[in-house]
Image: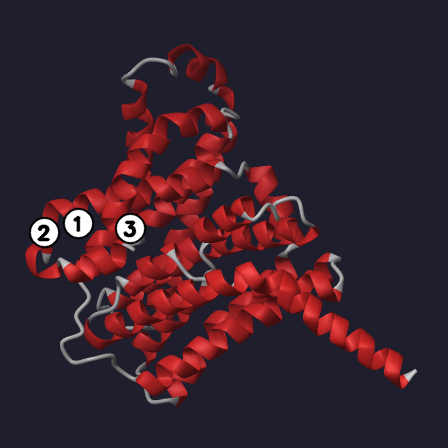
Amino acid sequence: MYILLGIVVSSFLYGNELLHFTGEVGIVLLFFMLGMEFPIKQLLNVTKKVMKAGILDVLLSFGVTTILCIVMGVDIIPSLIIGGVVYTTSSSITAKMLENSKRIANPESEFMLGLLIFEDLVAPILVAILVGITAGAAITTMSMSILLLKVVALVAGAIILGYFLFSKLGPFFDRHMNKDIFILFVVGLALAYGGLALFLDLSEVLGAFLAGIMLAEVRRTHELEKIVVQSKDLLLPLFFLYFGTTISFSEGIPMVGLLILVLIWSITAKILVGFFGGQWYGLSKRVSLKAGLSLTQRGEFSIIIAALAVGPIKAFSSVFILLSAMIGIILFQFAPQITQKIYNRKKINQQRVA
């Protein structure tokens, strides 16, 4: 909705630096809060359980999409951006719909949330790599090695600080958490580590996510979220609004054929990831299919990656995000009915054969 509003008012707000800055702070706070949900040990456990499904997700949603774009004549860097846009399911939309539909207690929800966590771990690193690639530097073995070394150093720094420093600061947080000025400390930590990521030519989203992981070691997540959530809810819509103001359809919707192909493949890829990944996780075929049908909506990370694009590729990515979000919401709502019809039909056919 905010993206559409941004497109409508783009003639008035295009290039507004204040809107841009406040929107960036909002997205930083969103991923700072996401990071706070995952203490280091929990991250390792979740990653281990959904590792096979997560790798399949990367290969199908990012890898195959990138190859499709290259085969269709798109240059390598725009193809990588489109692949990144297609990769991640929207954590916010999916979690909200699981809650609203009362499916949060269903068997597939644990697998789905685990896969979303895996994506939330991979996507900031993917964003950091794409930021480095789109910065204008030549893509060489040396430049990629340096880029990956920066990512590893930033992640290692967060783990060390979280494990050896923040894990011992529980009493300090208990003493000062109710003070009004404490919000400056918490938000300042997110912005500072995000700023360090920018200094290293990485994404501020990765820095903010890692800052949240550091703070998760304090084991005061619920209380800290209360401090940050109001600022996040106020500023985050401005990020989507600003993104909408940067989209131009003056030359129409570009590459319509490729758009339809990528949209169909993006839905197919997530269904395959859910179907096979769910079974590797220990779910039945029926439940795994329902999980796959519920994972097709794209959102916040796709928008972050789309913002790296310019011109027709940004317009292409924007239309894809809007369409996939709408189709994904519909598929999520009807996933139980679709799954039931498919497997009831199979059961009837098997009975006829018998």
Q: Residue at x 22, y 59 (%)?
A: 244
> Which amino acid, mark 3?
Leu
Residue 158 in view (yes/no) = no
Circle 1 Cα neighbour tier, 10 Å, few/some/many (<14 / 14–19 / ≥20): many
- Residue 200: mark: 3
Please tell me which of labels 3 and 2 falls first in the chain. 2
Q: Mark 3 vs mark 2: give the one in front.
A: 2
The foreground one among 165 and 179 is 179
Cβ atoms at labels 1 and 2 below 8 Å apart: yes
Label 1 to label 2: alpha-carbon separation: 6 Å
Q: Residue 105: horizontal and vertical position, in percent?
A: 66, 44
Label 3 to label 1: alpha-carbon separation: 21 Å
**Can you tell which quarter of the image residue 209 is in?**
top left
Q: Dividing the image into 4 quarters, which one contains the N terminus?
A: bottom left
> Which amino acid, mark 2?
Asn
Q: Is 18 located above or below residue 278 in the figure?
A: above
Residue 266 as seen in the image, left or right of residue 344: left
Cβ atoms at labels 3 and 2 below 8 Å apart: no
Q: Residue 166: horizontal and vertical position, in percent?
A: 46, 26
Q: Is 184 located above or below residue 159 in the figure?
A: above
Q: Residue at x 15, y 47 (%)?
A: 19
- Residue 20: mark: 1
Q: Mark 3 vs mark 1: give the one in front.
A: 1
Label 3 to label 2: alpha-carbon separation: 26 Å
Mark 2 = which residue? 16
Q: Is 350 located above or below residue 213 in the figure?
A: below
> Helix, strand, or loop for circle 2?
loop
